[in-house]
Amino acid sequence: MIKCSIGVCVYNEEKNIGKFLESLLSQKLGRVKIDEVLIIISGSTDNTYKIVKKYTLKESKIKIIRQKRREGKASAVNLFVGKAENEVLVLLGGDIILDLNTIENLVSKFKDSEVGMTGVRPIPLNDINDGLIGYAAHLLWGLHHKISLTHPKMGEVVAFRRIFRRIPVLSSVDEANIEPLIRGQGYKIVYVPEAKIYNKAAKTIFDYIKQRKRIYSGHLAVKYEQSYEVATLDIFSILKALFFFLRENPRLRYIFYTPFVILLEAYCRFLGWWDYRIAKKRHTVWEFVKSTKEL
């Protein structure tokens, strides 16, 4: 039996946190035991705390850690790592829904003593036929899946051994920051495609740009400050994954949309590069992306 601690970092998640917690408490477990669920509520101004408080009365393993002001996800992650009681930690957000076997599939891999980190397969709830942005959501996560099958890239939900005390406090991409800390100590990183989670990607171009530039800026910080490049920055891997994605989804509409998604992504990466290299702007405290907050 592998015991794990769950850490959930949330900010103004009143619309999603109940659905998320229901999916967490409904997990089918056999080889894995969830010992505790630490919910870090960072400066929320809505009803997130009240909703979570009700769940603590139903389930004693759920505990609340409150941060009076919003200090960024890295701060919440470091708080979780410091407070958790188990060797294996699972890090999540409150704006996703777990498949029934997600935690079991994700954590059971730690039976192998060489495994230091595992990651899920995110599946967007957006309608793929909902215009350019709907298609973009499925294309990006589809490429993420294809690339991760051969070169694991962690995203959305990760499990890892507690072999470090903290991640960089200015981080805006916590999963990417954790990868080199794990690999650097000789552990393997494993992508677990059967561990599925469902999320809502941005529904507007404005929100899409806001999110993608923040992620790319964060990946550049990891590259230059931790000497580590995430798998999804490799152009050859992206082109190879794109070929297989389009071969499996050969609709004319998707082929037509693809160049526009590429141009949009290039624009977002330029903005992310500008923020990191020129403006020296760090996205430690994320801009709120409203259209991703309604599961």
Image (cartoon, rainbow, N blue to C red):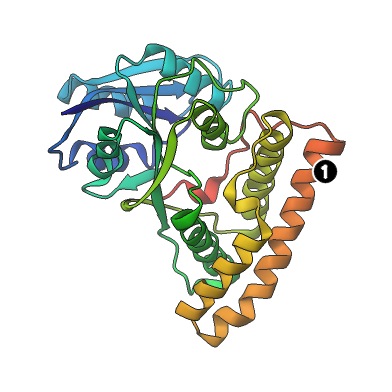
Can you name the residue that lies furthest to the right here? 278
Q: Can residue 232 be seen in this view?
A: yes
Above or below 104: residue 121: below
Quarter of the image with the N terminus is top left
Where is residue 129? Give x, y as percent.
48, 75
In the image: residue 277, left or right of residue 292: right
Where is residue 184? Give x, y as percent.
54, 28
* Quadrant of residue 92 within the rendered picture: top left
Please tell me which residue is depicted at 61% across the width and 33% down the height of the picture.
172
In the image: residue 281, left or right of residue 226: right
**181 or 273, which is in the foreground?**
181
Where is residue 136? Give x, y as percent.
57, 65
Above or below 230: residue 7: above
In the image: residue 6, left or right of residue 244: left
Crowding at dot 1, Cα within 10 Å, few <14 / some 14-19 / many 20+, comes out as some
* Quadrant of residue 96 within the rendered picture: top left
Please tell me which residue is depicted at 60% across the width and 61% down the height of the picture.
237
Residue designated by label 1: 274
* Quadrant of residue 65 within the rendered picture: top left
Please tell me which residue is depicted at 41% across the width and 22% down the height of the picture.
40
In this figure, what is the number of numbered marks?
1
User: Which kind of residue does numbered mark 1 sit on?
Assistant: Trp
Q: Is mark 1 on a helix, strand or loop?
A: helix
Above or below 44: residue 17: below
**137 or 11, which is in the foreground?**
137
Can you name the residue that lies furthest to the bottom here? 252
Please tell me which residue is depicted at 69% across the width and 33% down the height of the picture.
227
